[in-house]
Amino acid sequence: ESLPPFIATLCRTVNIEIYCPTSWKIMRNLFGTHLGHSTLDTMRKILRSDGSLCDVGLLRGAVFYINMALWGNKRVQTLKCTPAAVLPSFQAALRCKHTVVMYEVMLSVQRLVNKHGNELLDPSWYLVLEIIKLIFQHIEEFESTPSLSQVSTHLHETLDTIESLIESGMFNGCVRTVFDIIERCSTLRPESSVQRLISYISATITPAQNRWLEKLDSLLCRFYLQDKRPGIRLTVLGILSNIVQTNRRLFEKELVRIVLGHLSNIAEEPNMAVRTAATQLLVDLFLNCEPERALEILDVLEKILNRAFDQRIIAEGEEDAEDIKMTAHGLVQGLKTAMYQHPPTPAIRAFALMTNHLDKHYSNSAYLNQVTSIRFMMLECILHLRADKHYRIGIASANPRYSMFLMAHNAVTT
């Protein structure tokens, strides 16, 4: 009968700095007696009791003692108790929603993962991840404070350790649950962590999976539109490009719709690397899709092509107009390819965009005056155009090939 109040007293006194070493010494000795397991069970009951929810010191002390006795540097060797037996009690203690208790529980879970993560089995991992989810939920609900920031720091350090275990193949829990947690707090995670998350999600985006196009759209919304870190956005664009290249023959219409839905305003993107990567994707899609959808893509490429003039941006050199150069090169290649296809409308539109763009170069020379490569490639393409005696358009070469669908206008009158 005297054991519960004695344990409760020690749980409270361990929170007082001057009594902490003595309290732990007494408790460790108690754990080492024949009452060790009874003591452990008593503290588990304290953590689960509704009557303890208002006693923060009692809860914190109980969590601390269990942590130190089972996973600490001076753990009690005679105690035989699996993590799965005590973690539900830690989870129950979080019902008090106090930062101090959350901090102690998070420290205990972190110590467990750091020291024994490669030994934990699925039941224990399930409980660890449930506790992490619950703590993160509390962090989201509470107003930010220095103590809450410390809880968040330990939570993310624990997630880092779990990710390392996954990478090394020593994680025995549910990988999907881990990445679900990381996705919830992705804005707070380092880029390397989010990139692993994106790779994990993208592995499930295949036509063999149900609602794969919706998953692709969701991935772009979450990590391309909402996340502002260039590295993350470039990773997503790379994955989108791979998916488009692999599946465009069968799902061209759907993929073009998704691409244009997210990249229609790419000309306004302030980051050059992101803008260039997106432009490359659009150009590749333009060169390999059906004429009807090529025209839709050309609407976006036109905005990129004329970006400097529309936004009144003066390019200091070639490197300031990489996206525009890429678009110009795509139009040249598109003209040379599309003129031999039916209908040749994309070729006509590409030619019109090129000539219009050249007009802007000479009427507003200040903006792209230093980017001579654009004018060179467009003029070179135009000067290589030829027409045979039937006015069919072709490209100058040793054995020129003329289009069956595109003809020059015969202005000669009789």
Image (tube, rainbow, N blue to C red):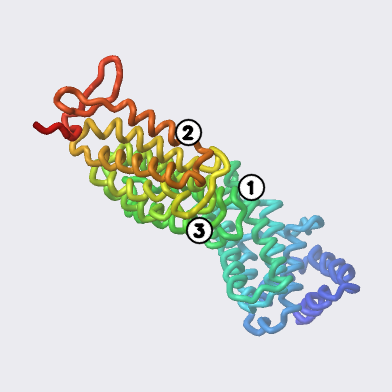
Q: Amino acid at mark 1?
A: Asn
Tell which of 6 and 238 is nearer to you: 238
- The residue sitting at the front extreme is 414
Label 1 crowding class (10 Å Cα cut-off): few <14, some 14-19, many 20+?
some
Q: Residues within 10 Å of mark 2 (few under 14, many from 20)?
A: few
Mark 2 or mark 1: name the one nearer the start of the chain.
1
Location of the C terminus (image quadrant): top left
Whole-percent x and y of residue 74? 81, 57
Q: What amino acid type should be assigned to the residue bearing mark 2?
A: Ser
Residue 70, given in percent of the width and then of the height, sits at: 73, 60
Query: Within 10 Å of the Cα at label 3, are there few (<14), some (14-19), or many (20+) other Cα atoms?
Result: some
Closer to the observer: label 1 or label 3? Answer: 3
Are discs 3 and 2 less than 8 Å apart at CB?
no
Which of the pair 65/278 is nearer the observer?
278
Instruction: Name the residue that disc number 3 marks.
Output: 180
Name the quadrant containing residue 401: top left
Task: Give residue 386's quadrant in the image.
Answer: top left
Numbered mark located on residue 373 in the image: 2
Q: Could you tell which of marks 1 and 3 lies nearer the N-terminus?
A: 1
Q: Residue at x 45, y 47 (%)?
A: 364
The residue under label 1 is 118
Residue 242 location in percent, x, y? Answer: 41, 40
Q: Is residue 203 in sight in this rendering?
A: no
